Amino acid sequence: MSETIPPTRRSAQDYETAVDSADRRVAAFDPHRRGPVEKLQHVLHSNPTLVPVIVLLGAVAVFGVVSGSKFFSAFNLTLIMQQVSIIGILAAAQSLIVLTAGIDLSVAAIMVLMSVIAGNLAVYSGVPAFLALIIAFVGGTAAGMFNGFLVTRVKLPPFITTLGTWSIFYALNLWLSGAQSIRSQDIDAAAPLLKVFGETIAIGPARITYGSILMVLVFLVLWYMLNRTAWGRHVYAVGDDAEAAELAGIRTGRTLMSVYALAGFVCGIAAWASIGRVGSISPQAFYEGNLQSITAVVIGGISLFGGRGSILGALFGALIVGVFQSGLRLAGVDVLWQVFAIGWLIIIAVAIDQWIRKVSA
Amino acid sequence: MKTLFAGSALALVLCAGTAYAEDTSACLITKTDTNPFFVKMKEGASAKADELGIELNTYAGKIDGDVETQVAAVESCIAAGAKGILITPSDSRALTPVVGKAREAGLLVIALDTPFEPIDAADATFATDNFLAGELIGKWAAAKMEDPSKAKIALLDLNPSQVSVDYLRDNGFLNGFGIDIKDPTKMGDEDDPRIVGNDVTNGNEEGGRTAMENLLQKDPGVNLVYTINEPAAAGAYEALKAVGLEDQALIVSVDGGCPGVRNVEAGVIGATSMQFPLKMASMGIEAIKAFADSGEKPQASEGLEFTNTGVELVTDQPVDGIPSITSQEALEKCWG
């Protein structure tokens, strides 16, 4: 008992005992429990294609009930595929550009110009059809590279660049075509190869055109390139944060250039497909194609801010537009209300995209 | 103010180099400068203007429906002191205020091809009688079909904005065929069960094809197809051919463009009503010349509110009681 600690010393040492009763964790994340809405937000963030897929299936189901067998028939569903095939292919090209945080207002103009060039050469100048098509592909690629040059070298914003080239390509198209369509019969006589994508395979009531198949193939090939090759990862990286990509050793200029060239090439393919789809070569067709392709991309959940979204989303986006138009039409809805509905689809799609982007970590 | 400035800037660009070499100047404002119909119109106007010593400035909208560019063009013409304006309004109602300003400023305003609403918004209108053009193909179709009471009619119109040329041709056709058209200034208000439906084409092949597919989807038994113009007709034919129904349906159209006439020759189009854009424009220039010389304004055709520049039915399958010309004869008169 001689060892009794004087009261003053005891209190001086005892303060440390308080540590034992305190929380020993130095730092930790807030153990915040996710509500169902936040869980959904996370799921959507990691699967950006989920929204368009749900909307597409939902729309097909709803219109199937509302408009019945006229809508929900193999014939009509394959018809929708046909009707969206050209805008779909353009949307694939558009997706490439949008993934790099750009926008391309000239895709449809490149396509129509190339279809006019191929048609003029093959029908009027006697150039073999396959050669005329190769020239159209090369021309499309060159047109894309011209956009790419202005964006990467002259450092113009993609919006302004393609706003300008849209008019330039459109004017060239009118000049070359004399604003005259090339008739279906003339193409049949001189260069039937140009119309090959209009051929249909009939499986029962379904009518699948080669053009519809081509659209799906274009998407699958581009999906593979974007998701399974180094080049594809570079495209996403550049779109997400160009500076960071540059610091990581990606040659951003070269990557961007390749994206624009590829998009132009895809527009060249679309030119071939469009001749089959329309039947004739019309310099006036697809004037709104540029904007319709952006609509498909946006509804498909590809972020306009770049680097996020799957190219397959654009395919679903194009199909959603087609399904809405067909469904509303068969339900007897006026054209202007179809336009109205598509407008809301765009706004809702972008609003959802913004909401998903807000997800934390 | 902003539009006035934009208009003047446009005028400066377009008029550079041709300023005031001649006393009388006139303007031609078309919907677009891409449609061969307007190209022909411009040719006709230019040739006549050269002949009469009138300086002609031409303007055009970028696409059909481009009202802003046309408004700016009218303002430029007023500013440039032109004697008269020939215009194909992109929107028959929206442009009436600005042409009103032009008339107040003392210009002679003549609508070509598409009448204004009201029609007296212009001093005169030189146009195809579009209702008659529609009526001719409607009557022809009724005479051609074995049993018009079993018709299933697809109507391929221009666009959703109910412009006059669109509803006049559409209602003219239905009237000629013998269907009660209800309001003659509205499309799609008819309740005759023979009508499968209306859809829009934007007057080109791509739109024509899609619209035809849509209406076939509503009723695959369509056997008579009215089309706003021949490119839309060509597109409709492609859609029918794609499902093997091209022999089931009779296609009729309006315009008289050369590719369209060749499609009549090829049997794609059964009959089309031909109009004469070159004549509209040259008559318009003559009227401006007369107005500049004597202040005299053109008179409308008898019984009509406008000056009819003529319409002829083109078909290789003539029917009794409806005068027509063959595609061979028509190829010599066609435009574009």
Image (cartoon, coloured by chain):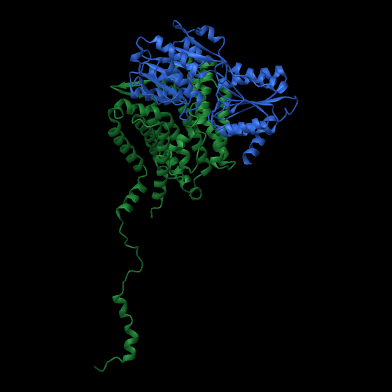
Chain colours: A green, B blue
Seen in the picture, residue A343 relative to A184 is either above or below; the reply is below
Seen in the picture, residue A198 relative to A326 is either above or below; the reply is above
Quadrant where the C terminus of chain A lies? bottom left
Q: How many marks?
A: 0
In the rendered view, does B11 fall on the left or right side of B335? right
The residue furthest left is: A1
Q: Nearer the viewer, residue B102 or B251?
A: B102
The residue furthest top is: B320
Q: Nearer the viewer, residue A81 or B289?
A: B289
x%, y% of residue A336? 43, 33
Q: Nearer the viewer, residue A259 or A63?
A: A63
The residue furthest front is: B303
In the rendered view, does A358 fall on the left or right side of A179? left
Quarter assignment of residue B216 = top left
Seen in the picture, residue B34 relative to A98 is either above or below; the reply is above
Residue A13 visible, this angle = yes
Residue A229 visible, this angle = no
Quadrant where the N terminus of chain A lies? bottom left
Q: Residue at position x 52%, y 23% from top? A: A116
In the rendered view, does B271 fall on the left or right side of A64? right
x%, y% of residue B226? 43, 18
x%, y% of residue A15? 33, 82
Quarter assignment of residue B180 = top left
x%, y% of residue B237? 42, 17
